Amino acid sequence: MSRLDAPVTALSGVGPAIAGKLERLGVERVADLLFQLPIRYEDRTRVTPVGAAIAGTRCVIHAEILLAEVVFRGRRSLLVRVGDGTGQLTLRFFHFSNAQKNMLQRGRWIVCYGEFRHGPSGPEMVHPEFRVVSEDDTPKLSDRLTPVYPTTEGLHQARMRTLVGKALAQLDREPPAELLPPGTRVAGSQTTLAEAIRFLHAPPPDVSLDALADGTHPCQRRLALEELVAHHVSLRQLRVQVRDTQAPVLAGDRSLLDAFISRLPFEPTGAQQRVLDEILEDTADAEPMMRLVQGDVGAGKTVVAAGAALAAIGAGHQCALMAPTELLAEQHFRSFKVWFDPLGVEVAWLTGSQRAAERREALAAVADCSARMVVGTHALFQEQVQFAALGLVIIDEQHRFGVHQRLSLRDKGTADSIPHQLVMTATPIPRTLAMTAYADLDTSVIDALPPGRTPVTTVVVPEQRRDEVVQRVAAACAEGRQAYWVCPLVEDSEVLDYQAAETTAAMLREQLPANTIGLVHGRMKPRDKERAMAAFSRGDSDVLVATTVIEVGVDVPNASLMIIENAERMGLAQLHQLRGRVGRGSAASSCVLLYKAPLSRMAKERLAVLRESTDGFVIADKDLELRGPGEVLGTRQAGAMNLRIADLARDADLLPTVHATAQTVLDGDDATITRRIDALVARWIGSASRYGNV
Ligand code: ADP
Ligand code: MG
């Protein structure tokens, strides 16, 4: 094994504690340190005369200590007055050891680095880094910019620099193989991987810092290209592997499917029909289907899923439908029960939270094929779940699951066949991104909403006008309608989210005493959550205050008003999803986006997009333009790609090169292909655990 592939603990000075901290930064192997690029750089390549230092900039000063004293003005501090003949300044230390104090003696010369500024008593630097040197020594300076790395609590910058330094030394001893085909170019640059890495960790002072900050320097692009190629080929190879296997031919009896369609209270839309036909064609073949169905919220994906399921069931096989949350799974379960019971098709239910007896029963029904349809959460993956004849796997809201989770359901097929796979997502993904993020899937789009929907009117309102918004809620309730009130997510903190939701619920209860206010948040037990949702769904509560847990799932046609707080902090895709919870019935619906002023120009533009469009694809494209794919795909979904350096939006222009390069990699002879792909995957994606796990 190459030393670069060794775990970080192979480096001297790295024990379990440091390794644990590094892991938080996504650094597990020595090589990972190389891909941990600096977030910015400091220029310590030259000495600035004190008289020429510019306030607000960081610089290196070489000066003599004129006076050092400990003072007690408010707090104990060490003041060190230094000068270099061109000017004087004061170094202030609030924390200092005796050793440090003793080092800083009058008459000595020091080199220090810090932010130069004008303090209350003249020029100063607070807590500069310093080193005692001799007067006539030209201080030893770096000829390269100094990297500043992302760090985490308890892992200091200096330590990070040392560790990366060790990894770089290893890189010099064993230069990594070039894995991209010869002749691959990024904007005229011909740097090798090793050169690009070395450059980015210690660029020369004349480098364009703007390009580095934007991530558009040719060296960064060289790494981004290779990373994207690695992801792309690994997905493509997955697809080839899947194609080499067999899936059951699901072209049997259509009577179940026909009966289902004829019993629906509505006609499937043309888009639904077309996508269903694409699926039926795919599954009538022994080559396993791997298809992504995109459709805006409310486009009617569930009906299409049910149709596909009945094709499998009609052909004597089973279908498993997996949803990311219990709530959503439950909703699907209910829909499928309503549709399938009259057809005599048993639907089983499997989740992590169900009682043991209930679960045993479901497992038995799945194992002996008496249940042809199984709906559940990721509990469907578990080992004890044995399908008798799994022919089709449907995964809803794909972005919540990683690629590997998706694959583990595939392994639930019989010995000589794997199930067909259908993935459904409500997050519209622009095509170039889809080609990269879902290179292993074919895509279908349900591009029209069922008729009779009135588009949701969206308004953007500053939070100072909250009272008016409350009146709006009151008016909607007075008309017998219901409303959602979505509280902000507070920095990933469940506790604070829950407090925000509680406070809002209390405020509404006080201001709307005649109405019933329900509450759901992430800290509630699933059962209590269900209860609150069910009450809202029955119309027993008028307003549902929620954290974003309602993002997926609930279908309450009587709800016609959606209030979203701190809308400026949410992604457009997420806002669009939330808004999709209203406008499901025939009543005119509206969505109020509350924001905290002042809004940045970008935030204004983003919210305006939502006001002006209700088309998920238009919104996704705009979002990509304005912000980048993290937002478009949703954080979790971007996490499924787990990119270290590349950024799908910023590097979108690289994608044609990525696809062409990937093709060249995949066109070699078998042995070369496998070796290259394995090496690329090992370098960029690492163990399966870091790829696509949620
Ligand atoms: P999605 O999962 O795509 O967001 P759903 O499948 O939950 O959408 O469908 C949203 C709502 O539209 C459901 O109440 C469903 O019964 C209804 N629906 C689906 N297809 C049609 C159609 N062709 N015509 C009218 N209503 C439909
Ligand atoms: Mg749905």
Image (cartoon, rainbow, N blue to C red):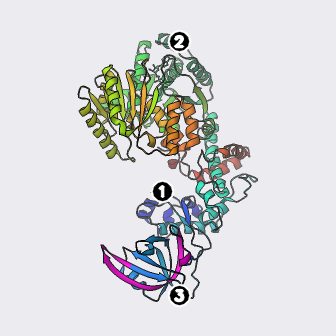
Identify the residue under disc 1. Answer: 25
Q: Measuring 41% from the left and 61% from the top, which residue is drawn there?
A: 153
Q: Measuring 61% from the left and 23% from the top, which residue is drawn there?
A: 278
Quadrant position of the N terminus in the picture: bottom right
Identify the residue under disc 3. Answer: 134
Can the viewer see residue 605? yes
Q: SS for tag 3?
A: loop
Q: Is the magenta stretch mostly helix, strand or loop?
A: strand
Percent of width and height locating residue 48:
57, 76
Which label lies toward us, 3 or 2?
Answer: 3
- The image shows residue 254, relative to residue 420, as above or below, that is above
Q: In this view, does 375 lie to the left or right of 201?
A: left
Question: Is the distance from the Cβ of mark 1 to the nearest ligand 2 atom less than 8 Å?
Answer: no
Percent of width and height locating residue 453:
48, 19
Which label lies toward us, 2 or 1?
Answer: 1
Give the magenta-colored segment's residue range.
50-78
Mark 2 / mark 1, whichever is N-terminal:
1
Can the viewer see residue 387? no
Identify the residue under disc 2. Answer: 258
Amino acid, disc 2: Asp
Magenta highlight on residue 157: no
